[in-house]
């Protein structure tokens, strides 16, 4: 695993839209969502056909308050959660099913939620939905809970580690590993982007929902992972959270995958032999 030592550029950051425009920075970016959807549908269909998938389970009352639960062979030894990205405004659980493969092969159940998207919900409301999902799914699978998420999902899983996270104490006590992949942990720069027309953030909510501005619970363990070929803002955000929370005496690490960009850095979740899957599914403090 390569550790990240991101350094700021010499010039001030002036174009926030370009700084967060992942699709524009990745060659062939438009081909990724259809490929994700096809791989996810094939994986999900196979597991459903052999009785190892529970699909479209409800965790709340809103139309998108549903999740898929994938089961390993035999009794699960714990639960891995994956929360999808899309800048809190796009996608749902159906594009990512195949990313459950690595953890499943290591004996864990894997749950993937959808959530209400902006502008139909604020980011604070989405945080509360993910908290409600975790409290619900904690009652479905025993054992330790490990969180993972990508981009906006990376933000949402780090947010669940904060002292004011909207989850029950019993749920929080079972979360012993988290991997935030390409997460956005300080939302304040997004106030100056065009996407805020949809996100509808104001400064108060940006501060309240920024994990890097909040205090982590004691005894958490978080790995912040980004691609070495990602936009500088994502590399900065990745290093930021691990560095800030390290000062609270919790286990943090910031790492990068050389050559990986925002859309392919998640691929190793499919590989049970990958380092990230080993971190997610290993014994506590290993």
Image (cartoon, helix red, strand yellow):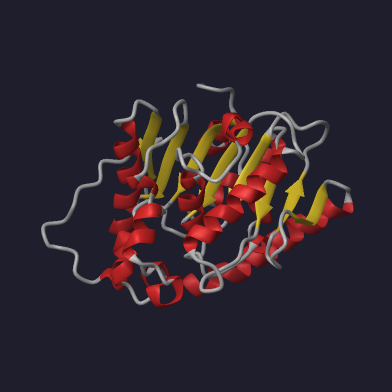
Farthest right residue?
Answer: 50
For the point 34% across and 46% down, the residue is 212
- From this view, report whether residue 110 is shown above or below residue 261: above
Can you give x and y, in whole percent of width and height, for residue 16 in the image?
A: 27, 69
Can you give x and y, in whole percent of width and height, for residue 63 in the image?
A: 71, 68
Farthest left residue?
Answer: 10
Can you give x and y, in whole percent of width and height, for residue 217 in the image?
A: 45, 32
Q: Is residue 187 visible?
A: no
- From this view, report whether residue 130 is shown above or below residue 221: below
Nearer-the-camera pick, 120 or 5? 120
Image-quadrant location for residue 214: top left
- From this view, report whether residue 105 is shown above or below residue 13: above
Image-quadrant location for residue 117: bottom right
Q: Is residue 29 visible?
A: yes
Image-quadrant location for residue 203: bottom left
Can you give x and y, in whole percent of width and height, for residue 109 in the image?
A: 72, 39
For the point 30% across and 38% down, the residue is 244
């Amino acid at each position: 695993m390569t550790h990240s030592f991101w350094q700021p550029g010499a010039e001030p950051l002036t174009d926030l839209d370009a700084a967060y425009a992942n699709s524009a920075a990745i060659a062939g970016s438009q081909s990724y969502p259809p490929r994700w959807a096809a791989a996810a549908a094939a994986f999900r269909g196979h597991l459903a056909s052999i009785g190892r998938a529970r699909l479209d389970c409800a965790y709340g009352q809103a139309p998108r308050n549903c999740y898929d639960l994938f089961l390993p062979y035999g009794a699960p030894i714990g639960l891995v959660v994956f929360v999808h990205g899309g800048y809190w405004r796009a996608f749902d659980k159906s594009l990512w099913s195949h990313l459950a493969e690595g953890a499943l092969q290591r004996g864990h159940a894997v749950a993937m939620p959808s959530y209400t998207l902006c502008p139909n919900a604020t980011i604070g409301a989405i945080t509360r939905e993910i908290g409600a999902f975790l409290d619900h799914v904690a009652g479905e699978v025993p054992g330790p809970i490990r969180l993972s998420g990508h981009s906006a999902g990376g933000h949402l899983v780090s947010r669940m580690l904060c002292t004011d996270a909207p989850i029950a104490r019993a749920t929080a006590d079972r979360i012993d590993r988290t991997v935030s992949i390409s997460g956005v942990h300080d939302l304040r720069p997004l106030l100056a982007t065009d996407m805020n027309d949809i996100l509808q953030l104001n400064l108060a909510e940006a501060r309240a929902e920024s994990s890097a501005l909040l205090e982590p619970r004691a005894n958490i363990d978080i790995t912040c992972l980004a691609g070495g070929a990602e936009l500088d803002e994502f590399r900065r955000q990745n290093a930021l959270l691990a560095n800030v929370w390290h000062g609270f005496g919790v286990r943090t690490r910031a790492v990068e995958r050389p050559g990986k960009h925002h859309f392919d850095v998640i691929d190793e979740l499919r590989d049970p032999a990958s380092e990230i899957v080993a971190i997610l599914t290993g014994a506590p403090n290993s």
